Amino acid sequence: MISQVRLWGVARAIGDWLHDWQTLVSGVLAIVAGGLTAYYLHKQIGQTERHERERLEREHRAARAVMPLPLMSILDACQDCIAELAEIHKKGRLNREEYPPQIPEFALSQDTVAILQDVIRTSNCTGIPELIHRLVVDVERVASGLKDLDEPSDDELDERIVDVAQVYALAAAAVKYAESDTVAASYSVGWDQVRLGLNRGVQRGRISGFCIQGAKDRLEERNKVKDYLWSV
């Protein structure tokens, strides 16, 4: 009997305490529940973000693996174009009837554009999307300039040759990234790569380097303006 009275007293005391402090108890429980909800929500968001990063990394590796093929075609087109422009320079004047030029088309195919878009979309490095953007812009600009080429002056030929060599340097840098296994903190394309593009074009056409001396001089003028062709 005494035990029952004691139990009843304890229960009543607890009930009175809960009645007096029910607002505080409800607040504490709400805070605990909110904390647990936030914890599991944060954990779920973290897992979702990790899975998304892993998916993008897989897609980026796949796009990066096939990236060199279309870029190599751009490098070949640059060498052919430099050789052809140097040949025109050598002849002194462009006459479409006597000497129809064989300037390669500087057009990016839809497949190439799709691959480059996938690389940009899945990349977690700001430098590579900017490099690809610069490459695409320069290809379009050079393509437009070559289409308008009609009885150009020596200075205009020199400008076009250096422009094409710059596309070569940008494409070569993109190929280097695609074939590497690492991601650098920063990227740059130096004028040495542009000079390499000029030399490769001359070698492709088996033409004396004297034919592009004006282009080399123009390249050095651009080098004096800024240290790198492109950097980020």
Image (cartoon, helix red, strand yellow):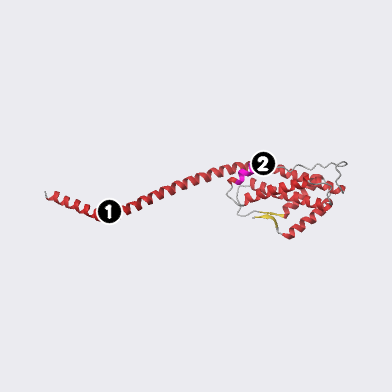
Q: Position of residue 63 (x, y in %)?
A: 61, 42
Q: Is residue 77 left or right of residue 23?
A: right
- Range of residues picked out in magenta: 114-120
Q: Position of residue 167 (x, y in %)?
A: 72, 49
User: Disc 1 to disc 2, how far (Cα)?
Assistant: 68 Å
Q: Is residue 118 magenta?
A: yes
Please identify the dominant SS of the magenta region.
helix
Which residue is at the front of the view, 21 or 159? 21
Q: Residue at left 50%, top 44%?
A: 51
The residue wearing badge 1 is: 22
Q: Secondary structure at mark 2?
A: helix
Q: Is residue 20 left or right of residue 36?
A: left
Q: Give amino acid for label 2.
A: Thr
Camera-nearest label, 1 or 2: 1
Q: Is residue 51 magenta?
A: no
Q: Secondary structure at mark 1?
A: helix
Q: Is residue 56 left or right of residue 89?
A: left
The residue wearing badge 2 is: 112
Instruction: Residue at the far bottom: name it.
Output: 224
Disc 1 crowd rating (10 Å Cα; few below 14, some 14-19, many 20+) is few
Disc 2 crowd rating (10 Å Cα; few below 14, some 14-19, many 20+) is some
Q: Give amino acid for label 1.
A: Gln
Q: Position of residue 214 (x, y in %)?
A: 82, 54
Q: Residue at left 87%, top 47%?
A: 91
Q: Please, is residue 218 above or below residue 66 in the view?
A: below
